Image: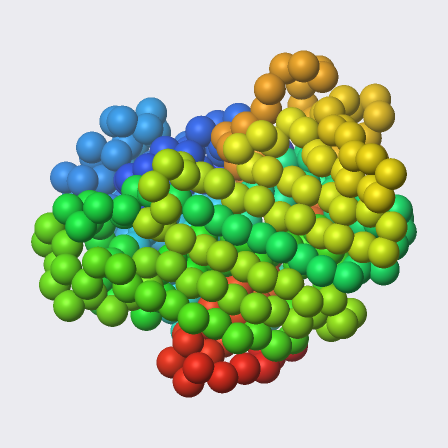
Amino acid sequence: MTTDVSVLPRTLHAAFIGGGFMAAVHSRAARAAGAELVGAASSSAERAADAAARLGLAGSFDSVDALLADPTIDVVHVCTPNATHAPIARAALEAGKHVVCEKPLATGAADAAALTELAAERRLVASVPFVYRFHPMAREARARVASGEVGALVSVHGAYLQDWLANPGDDDWRVDTALGGPSRAFADIGSHLVDLVEFASGDRIVRLSAAARTVHPNRANHADISTEDLAAVVVELASGAVGTLLVSQVAPGHKNALVIELSGADATVRFEQERPDRLWLGRVNGSRLVDRDPAALAPDAARLSRVPAGHPMGYQDAFNAFVADSYAAIRGEAPDGLPTFADGLRAVRVTDAVLASAASRDWVEVPA
């Protein structure tokens, strides 16, 4: 079954699989984009009903199969534990639904590649919420690199630091490989870091050398944990630029410190997710802060700047913009920079390379 975008109603009908934090974020973004929120499915009928009530959805479904069988649903948001993403996304595509699937798209590259191919074959929109690229100032960084303002890329530096698992008593389903997959910190937040570095630079990582560590092998409800708490990666890019990436979920004091810095022959640009309304621009003869002002930004950055200068924008605004662009694509438009299943596959391949390098203690090539 293939959806004909020419006959889609102007108001899309969205449904959600899963009912946790990410389902709440997705549902708010879908509502902001003007969708009808049809309902939710979860691990049980009771949990689905609870999610529908909490999220303000029209109803709930007793099972994922029941949700996918509803002919009124245009797009399905997959907000479940990592190991379930691939089978649910495949079932949704096979049911003719457009899909917005949380990352990682799959816990292995073969499944991610198969999903990417299936979405293309069915001509369905399939996106992955690498939402940090939807901050206007991240787009401004990208525009300045693409225009040649920073010069030929020389180096990249990035970090994504959190502390929500810093203590041995901190626990979550993500530490369990059966639910979260073989990688945790890198698959969860390192994927965002890599996506933003590659998106803003217009360059690709071709080789890497990684070290990873599990700081707390035993937590409150899990023992013998093998997924990494942190990873440090040295990268080489296709242009010849080199760089370093640090990812940690055990960095006390850091809540969501995603930072990228791109240095060229002429200038450096730095974007900090916790200070998203400013871009740092550095040169040999001085540096300055560039404030988010739609009147002064590159066109794509200005497009995403939904409120006037001086009115802060944040994470939910970026997520709203991502979902709005996903829905625009479903209606037949071609918004710039929409992260698709191909980008989800790319993230899985980089994660696989990080795990392989950390295990072998050697350089690993990243598949194109």
Residue 256 can be seen in this image: yes
Return the residue nearer the eye: 53 or 190: 190
Tell whether 219 sits left or right of 334: left
Locate the C terminus and report the quarter of the image it occupies.
Answer: bottom right
Q: Position of residue 132 (x, y in %)?
A: 57, 43
Residue at 22% across, 53% down: 173
Residue 117 can be seen in this image: no
Return the residue nearer the eye: 33 or 251: 251
Which colour style is shown?
A: rainbow
Return the residue nearer the eye: 348 or 257: 257
Q: Position of residue 166 (x, y in %)?
A: 27, 46
Q: Position of residue 279 (x, y in %)?
A: 70, 34
Compared to residue 284, the image places residue 247 above or below, namely below
Q: Position of residue 288 (x, y in %)?
A: 78, 30
Residue at 79% across, 34% down: 287
Residue at 83% across, 42% down: 283
Quarter-of-image position of residue 215: bottom left
Q: Residue furthest front?
A: 285
Residue at 87% across, 38% down: 285
Tell whether 330 sits left or right of 108: right
Compared to residue 307, the image places residue 103 above or below, namely below
**Number of numbered tags placed on the structure image:** 0
Tell whether 253 sits left or right of 52: right
